[in-house]
Image (cartoon, helix red, strand yellow):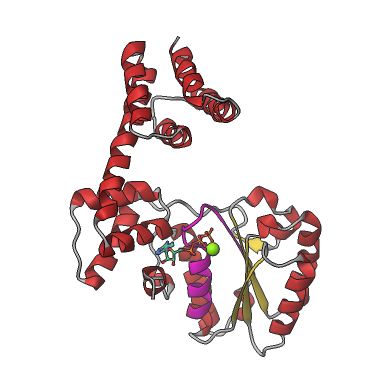
């Protein structure tokens, strides 16, 4: 069994972070357990991958209705057309009592299919829908209106939360890793619990990977240096030297841009306008370097231009 399966939270109590969602679902589960099923509604779970959207659905419904609660998970983007979804739902909704349908990647359904889905959601009073997506704006408003948490977002887990989760696993496995290795995994996972657990499992079987992860970290540190240089007006030469080193270490432009954005978003000395301006610039760099033959040259020129 993979660690992902082995350590998937079974109950809402096991979930790390996402308190704004979990707190409410715990209440609902409590009420249901004491017989008040009218507190149930449909649910919306939007946010980045690997942050617990699907996991929380299972934990919630099992907390409310017990281990054997009927749950059907359908990937909306795999099913050809909403009819397939409707037929599955229909068959499933015949079971006595309440059941949960987790519909993943609703944002990949066409708006027509979503409109049909919306009606299906209204037909079966004992079927609870839990819709997950990465891009909530792609889900039609009438669906969102019928769901709790339509205005909430799942958050990337914080470094501290990822660390807590990984430490639990290490304890359970009776394993240890160094602080440096822990840092490297936490940083590379970027708040994605699935990635973090997969990395940890990979390292537990072979330590080879850790070296490349540590060197990735060193490369990303160069981006932080470039960020500082650009923002604080260091000499163009110094910044260029770091850019050259970045590419020499195998750094990639998309990773650069992502890291640069992370820096922007956590930079408290910038106001909204500055951030917007820089976001535009970065978006520009991503686009323009993707359409030329020698992206690194253009990239260097762009960075220097930003400093001018
Ligand atoms: N908040 C969390 N607390 C503890 N473990 C978590 C959490 N979020 C995710 N995990 C772990 O990561 C794995 C993936 O999580 P999950 O499938 O719930 O992500 P997701 O948000 O549904 O992602 P996707 O958008 O890719 O469907 C789970 O098996 C679980 O082990
Ligand atoms: Mg999921």
Q: Is residue 248 above or below residue 121?
A: above
Q: Is residue 298 left or right of residue 239?
A: right
Q: Is residue 277 left or right of residue 259?
A: right
Q: Quadrant of residue 194?
A: bottom left
Extreme-front residue of the structure: 293
Q: Is residue 122 above or below residue 233?
A: below
Extreme-bottom residue of the structure: 96
Q: Is residue 288 left or right of residue 159?
A: right
Residue range (magenta): 43-62
Residue 47 within the magenta-colored segment of the rendering: yes
Please report the residue visible at 67 percent of the width from the left and 48 percent of the height from the top.
Answer: 137
Q: Is residue 25 above or below residue 238?
A: below
Q: If the image is split into quadrants, where does the N terminus sit?
A: bottom left
Q: Is residue 190 visible?
A: yes
Of 179 and 156, which appears nearest the observer?
A: 179
Please report the residue visible at 30 percent of the width from the left and 46 percent of the height from the top.
Answer: 212
Residue 142 within the magenta-colored segment of the rendering: no
Q: Quadrant of residue 35?
A: bottom right
Of 201 and 123, which appears nearest the observer?
A: 201
Which x, y percent locates residue 173? 24, 71
Of 33 and 104, which appears nearest the observer?
A: 104
Which x, y percent locates residue 26? 47, 71
Q: Is residue 153 left or right of residue 201?
A: right
């Amino acid at each position: 069994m993979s660690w992902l399966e082995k350590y998937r939270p079974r109950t809402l109590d096991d979930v790390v972070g996402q308190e704004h969602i979990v707190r409410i679902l715990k209440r609902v589960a409590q009420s249901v357990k004491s017989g008040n099923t009218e507190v149930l509604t449909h649910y919306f779970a939007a946010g980045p991958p690997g942050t617990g959207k699907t996991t929380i659905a299972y934990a919630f419904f099992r907390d409310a209705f017990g281990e054997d609660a009927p749950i059907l998970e359908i990937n909306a983007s795999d099913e050809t057309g909403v009819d397939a979804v409707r037929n599955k739902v229909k068959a499933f909704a015949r079971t006595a009592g309440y059941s949960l349908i987790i519909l993943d990647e609703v944002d990949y359904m066409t708006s027509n299919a979503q409109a049909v889905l919306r009606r299906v959601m209204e037909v079966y009073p004992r079927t609870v829908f839990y819709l997950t997506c990465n891009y909530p704006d792609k889900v039609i408003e009438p669906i969102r209106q019928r769901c709790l948490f339509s205005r909430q977002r799942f958050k990337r887990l914080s470094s501290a939360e990822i660390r807590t989760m990984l430490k639990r696993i290490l304890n359970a496995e009776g394993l240890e890793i160094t602080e440096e290795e822990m840092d490297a995994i936490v940083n590379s996972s970027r708040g994605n619990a699935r990635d973090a657990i997969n990395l940890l499992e990979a390292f537990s079987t072979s330590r080879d990977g850790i070296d490349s992860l540590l060197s990735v970290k060193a490369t990303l540190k160069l981006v932080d240096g470039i960020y500082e240089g650009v923002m604080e007006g260091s000499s163009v030469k110094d910044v260029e030297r770091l850019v050259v080193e970045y590419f020499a270490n195998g750094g990639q432009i998309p990773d650069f841009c992502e890291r640069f954005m992370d820096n922007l978003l956590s930079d408290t000395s910038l106001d909204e306008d500055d951030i917007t301006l820089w976001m535009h610039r970065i978006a520009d760099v991503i686009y323009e370097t993707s359409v030329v033959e020698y992206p690194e040259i253009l990239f260097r020129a762009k960075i220097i231009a930003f400093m001018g």
